[in-house]
Image (cartoon, helix red, strand yellow):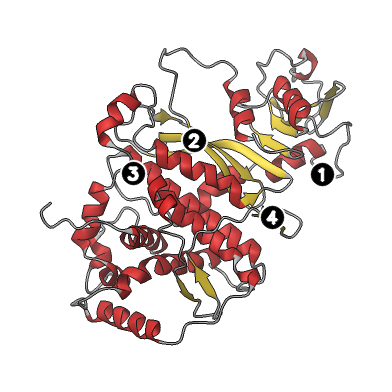
Amino acid sequence: MEEWKAMDASDLRAYIGLLILSGVYKSRGKAAASLWDAQSGRAIFRATMQLKVFYTYSTSIRFDDRGTRAARRATDKLAAIREVWDMWVERLPRLYDPGPEVTVDEQLVAFRGRCPFRQYMPSKPAKYGIKSWVTCDAKSSYAWKMQVYSGKSSDGAPERSQGMRVVLDMTDGLKDRNVMCDNFFTSYDLGRELMATRNMTMVGTVRKNRTELPSELLTTTNRRRVLSSQFAFTPTTTLVSYLAKKNKNILLISTRHTNDEISDRNNGKPPIVLDYNRNKGGVDNLDKVIAAYSCKRKTARWPLVIFSNIVDVSSYNAFVIWREVNPNWMPRKRNKRRFFLKQLGRALVTPLIERRRCLPRAEAAAAVVKDLRMASCRDPPPRQQPEEDGAAAAAAAALWVTMTPTQREDGVIDGAVGHNDPETGRGINASCIDNEESVRVNGEGRVR
């Protein structure tokens, strides 16, 4: 530790940028040294920092005061990363207003190491990991609110009506929207509570052991025809039983639909089922797109696993905001998200590369440093137009995740860091803005 040099904001941004780029190059599961290899690695990694410095940051990074952790952990299992997590979660709803359809579901981040609240979920591909509750926009999969599940309370008593409590917590701050949730959350009482207090409707599958269900809709006798539907009504709620196959009875509750309408499709599905199938996958799609370019590295420390998930979700949220602010960006192009993440990662590492005193030994890495130095000596690009400034909010989501309250007060990330897109010539910024005005985007979600 005698050679330790204090990490400043540029070092931290560059470290996050390299994590994002490692996900772009799909190096998950590979040794970090392969990215720094002079022959087969990526030149931008050697141009940014030495491999031993990256290792030092990865092993030394902490998210709280270790001296007071024991006292805080007595009442908070998430104490090791609570401050950073709360700051990040608080910012998510401020950047984006979801559209008329939102999805509430659970996310499992794979982890098999020691963790006081590690969960086992056999239905998930990873089986073991850290579970979070997530509220997403059903169309864009923007993560609007997240909450880590830290297990049972300190007294060990199971939580009653957990599903209802989670949905109410995860939709706090929303009104006049429709919530999609699965049978773990859905209940008759939840639908009435959402309608009475927030003017929100609910559509979701429901478990057959709910006491409020009528017995007539639970039976699947041989007399009932396959692909048939049966309905039950209250003044505010519709319950449908759809027999998809023999002895496969699907039950859904809706406070949005008020009639027994059946679609004209061959399978005879009612609109309740069609609406649910159309909007249920917001969180599942988020898991899918994050896994494609995840920056997660192999580690035995669960706070670092949560931090990697923060960077992954923030990077995707940034892409959603950029795409909706710039709907005509890169038309008819594939792999837009990969290109965006690559530009975002390079924007984060550029300041550290520009201030290097010595050139790297590898020719390719040295060429990267020289090109950036030459680009910085040219005339600065013209001021972006107002409609392009919204992209700064997108990149800000990826930067804000590791800032401490002191850094926020000192404004260490208030300056813009960026460069021009080589294909479009438009700038991709990485700056922190706080704009409370909202702009309607395509009649769907709103970018703040």
Residue topped by disc 2: 132
Q: Position of residue 292 (x, y in %)?
A: 46, 56
- 1 or 3: tag closer to the N-terminus: 1
Circles 2 and 3 in contact, beta carbons < 8 Å = no
Secondary structure under the numbered disc 1 in the rendered image: loop
Q: Which label number is shown at residue 289?
A: none
Query: Which residue appears at 28% of the width and 26% of the height?
Result: 70
Amino acid type, residue under disc 4 in the picture: Ser
Q: Which label number is shown at residue 266?
A: 1
Q: CA distance from mark 1 to mark 3?
A: 50 Å
- 3 or 4: tag closer to the N-terminus: 3
Q: Is residue 219 left or right of residue 360?
A: right
Secondary structure under the numbered disc 3 in the rendered image: helix
Q: Is residue 410 above or below residue 193?
A: below
Amino acid type, residue under disc 2 in the picture: Ser
Q: Is residue 396 left or right of residue 306?
A: right
Residue topped by disc 4: 438
Secondary structure under the numbered disc 2 in the rendered image: strand
- The mark closer to the camera, 4 or 2, is 4
